[in-house]
Image (cartoon, grey):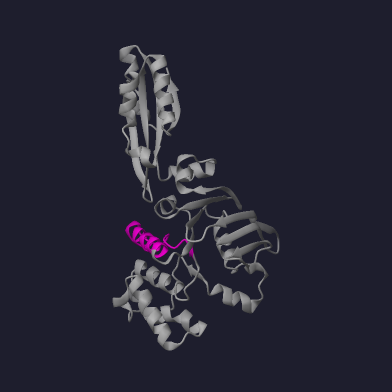
């Protein structure tokens, strides 16, 4: 659906050149929810603005549904943009227009027949749950309601691609969950490709199929969200994941361990569970099979969309060969096992 190839953007001021994007390449599948996460100034907002050509790239190309939009003339680009919806952080609603008229606005610009446009607006207001607020003005709406109007407006021209620029960062956590739920529903019901940018890993965890991590103008990691959470390859990714999942074992939990009382060998490990393995009794099976005791020191279970994942910190005690057999068993079951400390 989207192919970004070697995209570079340089902003030129009177005193310097600022490299905002450095040879960025991405591929987004049709119908997926794709996230771009990065800190402020990393280049994520510039990237999404280059994708819809609100910013003209210095070099590189952006191919959407087979069309390289970086090569289009002005009139062709205006036509192509009608199939790219955009949701903004600050809503960008017209204060003098009602909810109904805000959603109608892009249809008026596109020259839709009145009857068809009216039907389309009514469908969209029902989709976003605002059919009872059609005569309200933006000043009479909550932040979440304003963003729902923004989403309806972005969908007016039946776009193939929906871009979300920090659409939930101005909202409280409960409203954020509601808006993300709406975007997931739109993705499932309409089969719409959605690309969203954010600095919040919770947004990625709740919504996205795949994610690209951007740092200092470059894409440093791309992958399925479950894979990024379970096996992050960069410090930037690990830092973002740490804001959502705390897998550090509290120091006080490491004191007074069983090995000191039994005289057996001891190994402290951290086990990562993803998907089906999170629901299997693998630890208890290991204990029975290999005569190893397991003391649970710390744990956490969560979900990435509908996929369960979690961490357990365990102290294994027993004979050395039994412990090694137990570790091999856990790894053989597809679990990620990290040795924290051995005795």
Q: Main secondary structure of the magenta part?
A: helix
Magenta residues? Answer: 163-188
- The answer to which of 305 and 289 lies nearer the viewer is 289
Please identify the quadrant where the N terminus is shown: bottom right
User: What residue is at 43 percent from the left and 81 percent from the top?
Assistant: 104
Please identify the quadrant where the C terminus is shown: top left
User: What residue is at 35 percent from the left and 13 percent from the top?
Assistant: 264
Magenta highlight on residue 332: no
How many marks the image carries: the answer is 0
Residue 211 sits above or below residue 263 on the image: below
Q: Position of residue 337 (x, y in %)?
A: 44, 30
Q: Position of residue 109 (x, y in %)?
A: 51, 83
Residue 9 sits above or below residue 251 on the image: below
- Residue 68, by quadrant, is bottom right
Q: Is residue 105 left or right of residue 284?
A: right
Q: Position of residue 139 (x, y in %)?
A: 36, 75
Q: Residue furthest top?
A: 263
Q: Is residue 107 left or right of residue 124?
A: right
User: What residue is at 49 percent from the left and 39 percent from the top?
Assistant: 231
| Residue 238 in sight from this viewpoint | yes
Residue 180 sits above or below residue 268 on the image: below
- The answer to which of 294 and 291 lies nearer the viewer is 291
Q: Is residue 320 left or right of residue 30?
A: left
């Amino acid at each position: 659906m989207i192919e970004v190839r070697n995209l570079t953007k340089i902003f030129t001021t009177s005193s310097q050149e600022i490299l905002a994007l450095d040879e960025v390449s991405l591929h987004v599948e049709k119908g997926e929810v794709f996230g771009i996460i990065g800190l402020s100034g990393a280049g994520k907002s510039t990237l999404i603005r280059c994708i819809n050509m609100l910013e003209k790239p210095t070099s590189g190309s952006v191919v959407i549904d087979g069309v390289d939009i970086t090569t289009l003339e002005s009139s062709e680009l205006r036509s192509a943009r009608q199939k790219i919806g955009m949701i903004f952080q600050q809503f960008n609603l017209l204060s003098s227009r009602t909810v109904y008229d805000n959603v109608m606005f892009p249809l008026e610009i596109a020259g839709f027949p009145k009857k068809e446009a009216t039907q389309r607006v009514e469908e969209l207001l029902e989709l976003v749950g605002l059919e009872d607020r059609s005569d309200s003005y933006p000043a009479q709406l909550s932040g979440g309601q304003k963003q729902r109007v923004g989403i309806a407006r972005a969908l007016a021209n039946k776009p193939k691609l929906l871009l979300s620029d920090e659409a939930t960062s101005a909202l409280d956590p409960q409203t954020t969950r509601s808006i993300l739920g709406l975007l997931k529903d739109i993705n499932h019901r309409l089969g719409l490709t959605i690309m969203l940018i954010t600095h919040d890993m919770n947004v990625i965890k709740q919504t996205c199929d795949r994610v690209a991590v951007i740092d200092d103008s470059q894409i440093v990691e791309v992958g399925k969200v479950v894979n990024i959470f379970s096996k992050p390859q960069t410090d930037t990714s690990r830092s973002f994941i740490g804001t959502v999942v705390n897998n550090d074992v509290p120091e006080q939990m490491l004191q007074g361990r069983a090995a000191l009382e039994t005289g057996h060998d001891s190994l402290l490990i951290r086990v990562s569970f993803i998907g089906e393995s999170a629901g299997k009794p693998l630890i208890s099976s290991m204990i029975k099979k290999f005569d190893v005791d397991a003391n649970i020191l710390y744990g956490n279970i969560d979900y990435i969309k509908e996929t369960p994942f979690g961490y357990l910190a365990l102290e294994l005690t027993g004979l050395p060969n039994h412990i090694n057999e137990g570790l091999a068993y856990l790894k053989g079951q597809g679990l990620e096992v990290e040795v924290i400390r051995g005795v």
